[in-house]
Image: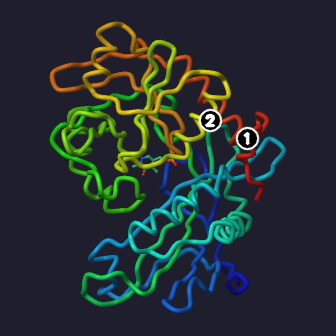
C-alpha cells in the first residue's frame, strides 16, 4: 500500500466536559482506505471527521455487505496511549470479511494505520478510571448498482469515540431475558461474523425485552432454542461448582469475543477449571435449583464484564449472586481493566503501545 497521507482538520472541536456516555461523541479525524478489484487495498488517508458521500445505489445500503469491529485505547498512569489486542480485532475482521465476501484486511498493516489515527487524535483519549477511546473500524461495499453479487469495491473506515463506562450504572448486575421466539443465528449462518445485519435482525427481540424491563436478551441456538449461544453484544459465562462454563465456538453461531478469549486465558493461568461446551438452558436451570449457580456474567469490549443479576427463562426467574457482583466477576474485571490500562503487568503481551 502507498504511504498514509494526513489532512488535518482546520476546525478542531472542543473537547467534551463532564460525563462522556458511550458512542455519542467523535474525534476530529477518521481513517479511510479503499479497495478496488485488481488493485487491492490502497490510498490510506486520514481526513477530517465528516459525512460520507455515497451514491444512493451503493450496494451496502441495499444488501448489507457491511462489517465492523470494536476495540479500545486507554491512557496509562504514565500518560502513554495503548490499545488492547488490536491484532485480534484485525484477524477477526479478516475472517468476518471472508464470510461476507469482503476482501480481508492485512493484520499488521491495518493495526499500524489505526495506531496512526489514534496517535493523531490522542488528546481525545480520556484519563478518568473506566474511560477509554472506543475505536470503530468498519468496511462497506461501495459499488453502485442494484444487483445481488459481491461488490468489486470497498471502503475501510475507522472512527474514534471517547467513552465513559458502557452502562450508566457502572459495574452493576443487569437483568437478562432468555429469548425463545426469535433467533440470532443458525448453523451455517453469520453468527460468528461481526456483520451489521446480525444486529438489525436482533433489534426486535432487544426492543421487546427492554419493554419488559430487561437490559439484554440471551440468545439460544436458532435450531431448537435449547442451548445457550450468547448475549446481545457479549459472550456469556456461568460459574458453577468452582468451574467456569461457556458455550464452545464450534457451532459457528457465536461471535468469538476477544474478551471471552482473554478471560479464558486468564482463568487457565489462575488454574480455575474451564469447560467450553454445549450448555443447555435446562442445565443452567438445574444448577440454579441445586444452589450451584454461583455467578453469571456477560463479557465484551464495551462493558468488559457485565454481571447478570437476574435471568428470566419462560416462567422462571433466577436471581443470582444476591444482586451483587460475584467475586470471580469482580476479580476478572479488575485483572482485565488493570492490564488494559497498564495498572497491572502485561504478562500475556496483550498491550500495544501506540
Ligand atoms: C463484538 C461482539 C462480542 C464481543 O466481542 P469482544 O471482542 O469481546 O468485544 C460478542 N458478541 C457479539 C454478537 C459481538 O458482536
Look at mark 1 in the image and give the residue it sits on: 348
Q: Callout 1: 10 Å neighbours few (<14), some, many (20+)?
A: few
The residue at 51%/14% (across/down) is 242
The disc at residue 265 is 2
Check disc 1 and report its element: helix, strand or loop. Answer: loop
Query: Residue at the location (38% across, 47% down)?
Result: 254
From this view, report whether residue 150 is shown above or below residue 342: below
Quarter of the figure that contains the C terminus:
bottom right
Quadrant into which the N terminus falls: bottom right
Report if the CB atoms under discs 2 and 1 are less than 8 Å apart.
Answer: yes
Can you tell which mark lies on residue 256? none
On the rendered structure, is 228 left or right of 313?
Answer: right
**Which residue shows up at 51% across the image and 45% down it?**
302
**In whole angstroms, how far apart are the C-alphas of marks 2 and 1?**
9 Å
Q: Position of residue 287 (x, y in %)?
A: 34, 14
Counting residues from the start of the chain, the first of labels 2 and 1 encountered is: 2
Quadrant hosting residue 13? bottom right
Task: Residue 48 in the image: state x and y as whole percent.
Answer: 60, 77
* Image point (57%, 78%), residue name: 32
Amino acid at each position: 500500500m502507498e504511504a498514509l497521507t494526513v489532512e488535518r482538520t482546520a476546525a478542531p472541536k472542543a473537547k467534551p466536559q463532564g460525563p462522556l456516555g458511550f458512542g455519542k461523541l467523535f474525534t476530529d479525524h477518521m481513517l479511510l482506505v479503499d479497495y478496488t478489484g485488481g488493485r487491492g487495498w490502497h490510498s490510506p488517508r486520514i481526513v477530517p471527521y465528516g459525512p460520507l458521500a455515497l451514491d444512493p445505489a451503493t450496494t451496502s445500503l441495499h444488501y448489507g455487505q457491511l462489517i465492523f469491529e470494536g476495540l479500545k485505547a486507554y491512557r496509562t498512569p504514565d500518560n502513554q496511549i495503548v490499545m488492547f489486542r488490536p491484532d485480534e480485532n484485525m484477524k477477526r475482521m479478516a475472517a468476518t470479511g471472508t464470510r461476507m465476501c469482503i476482501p480481508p484486511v492485512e493484520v499488521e498493516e491495518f493495526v499500524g494505520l489505526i495506531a496512526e489515527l489514534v496517535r493523531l487524535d490522542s488528546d481525545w483519549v480520556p484519563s478518568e478510571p473506566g474511560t477509554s477511546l472506543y475505536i470503530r473500524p468498519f468496511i462497506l461495499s461501495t459499488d453502485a448498482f442494484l444487483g445481488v453479487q459481491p461488490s468489486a469495491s470497498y471502503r475501510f473506515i475507522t472512527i474514534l469515540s471517547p467513552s465513559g463506562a458502557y452502562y450508566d450504572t457502572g459495574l452493576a448486575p443487569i437483568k437478562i431475558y432468555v429469548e425463545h421466539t426469535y433467533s440470532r443465528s443458525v448453523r451455517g449462518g453469520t453468527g460468528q461474523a461481526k456483520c451489521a445485519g446480525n444486529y438489525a435482525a436482533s433489534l426486535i427481540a432487544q426492543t421487546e425485552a427492554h419493554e419488559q424491563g430487561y437490559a439484554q436478551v440471551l440468545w439460544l441456538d436458532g435450531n431448537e432454542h435449547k442451548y445457550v449461544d450468547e448475549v446481545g453484544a457479549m459472550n456469556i459465562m456461568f460459574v458453577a461448582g468452582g468451574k467456569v462454563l461457556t458455550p464452545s465456538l464450534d457451532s459457528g453461531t457465536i461471535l468469538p469475543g476477544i474478551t471471552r478469549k482473554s478471560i479464558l486465558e486468564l482463568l487457565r493461568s489462575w488454574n480455575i477449571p474451564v469447560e467450553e461446551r454445549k450448555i443447555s438452558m435446562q442445565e443452567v436451570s438445574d444448577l440454579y435449583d441445586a444452589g450451584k449457580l454461583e455467578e453469571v456474567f456477560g463479557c465484551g469490549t464495551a462493558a468488559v464484564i457485565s454481571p447478570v443479576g437476574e435471568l428470566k427463562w419462560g416462567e422462571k426467574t433466577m436471581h443470582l449472586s444476591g444482586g451483587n457482583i460475584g467475586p470471580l466477576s469482580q476479580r476478572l474485571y479488575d485483572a482485565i481493566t488493570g492490564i488494559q490500562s497498564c495498572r497491572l503487568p502485561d504478562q500475556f503481551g496483550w498491550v500495544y503501545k501506540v
